[in-house]
């Protein structure tokens, strides 16, 4: 599983505060921002936003194609097989913006972590993903910690079994995230 903990959150505490009217200084805000961003990224199998440059060490099964753990590639900077075999784009491999490498002649090696790809990928922004993150965070923070329901007079409010804790996505939110999700993530 990829380590998404060192990335900037999908939304900021200021955005959450503006969206939900919860003060940025509320001690729960930082955890909600970090936790929901991490949950979204783990569900989708990649970081989504922002656009970053990184080197990925990939396994290969010896075929012509390698799927990259991304759904939006803007640049392939370098592809290396093993320690010191550098491949040339369009001569030895091609790539797709939706995250696939194709070996033009021959096959990729059959080895774990044998293909090293330096690339720029991810969206500069993803407003629909940010909207999902904000909605989930607002629901989490609206429910008093540990309280599942409240009643006063003839009015009753139910918050949900995980009030104030783990991210819970609604079906409509999962439909948005599924457009960014890597198959098998």
Image (spheres, rainbow, N blue to C red):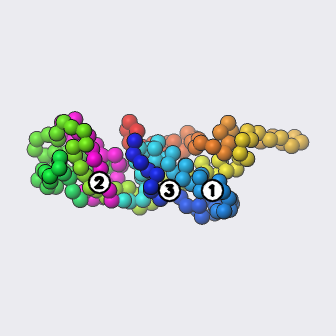
Instruction: Name the image quarter holding residue 118.
Output: bottom left
Is 61 situated left or right of 141 in this image? left
Q: Could you tell me which residue is drawn at 59 percent across and 52 percent down?
A: 31
Where residue 10 is drawn, which disc sits there?
A: 3
Q: Mark 2 or mark 3, which has the lower sequence index?
A: 3
- In magenta, the rendered stretch is 53-76
Instruction: Name the image quarter holding residue 49.
Output: bottom left
Q: Which residue is mark 2?
A: 55
- Whether residue 68 is in magenta: the answer is yes
Inter-mark Cα distance, 1 to 3 = 13 Å
Q: Which residue is mark 1?
A: 29
Where residue 49 is drawn, which disc sits there?
A: none
The residue carrying pointer 1 sits among few (fewer than 14), some (14 to 19) or many (20 or more) residues within 10 Å by Cα, namely many
Q: Mark 1 or mark 3, which has the lower sequence index?
A: 3
- Whether residue 72 is in magenta: the answer is yes
Is 39 situated left or right of 59 in this image? right
């Amino acid at each position: 599983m990829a380590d998404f903990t060192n990335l900037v959150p999908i939304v900021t505490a200021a955005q959450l505060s503006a969206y939900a009217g919860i003060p940025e200084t509320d001690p729960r805000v930082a955890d909600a921002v970090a936790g929901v961003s991490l949950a979204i990224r783990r569900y989708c199998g990649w970081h989504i936003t922002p656009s970053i440059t990184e080197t990925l060490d990939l396994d290969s099964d010896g075929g012509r194609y390698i799927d990259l753990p991304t759904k939006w590639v803007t640049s392939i900077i370098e592809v290396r097989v093993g320690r010191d075999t550098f491949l040339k784009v369009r001569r030895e491999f091609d790539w797709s913006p939706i995250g696939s490498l194709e070996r033009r002649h021959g096959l990729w090696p059959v080895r774990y972590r044998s293909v090293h790809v330096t690339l720029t990928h991810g969206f500069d922004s993803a407003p629909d993903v940010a909207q999902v993150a904000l909605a989930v965070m607002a629901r989490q923070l609206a429910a008093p910690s540990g309280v599942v329901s409240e009643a006063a007079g003839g009015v009753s409010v139910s918050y949900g079994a995980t009030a104030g804790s783990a991210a819970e996505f609604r079906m409509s939110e999962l439909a948005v995230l599924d457009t960014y999700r890597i198959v098998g993530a």
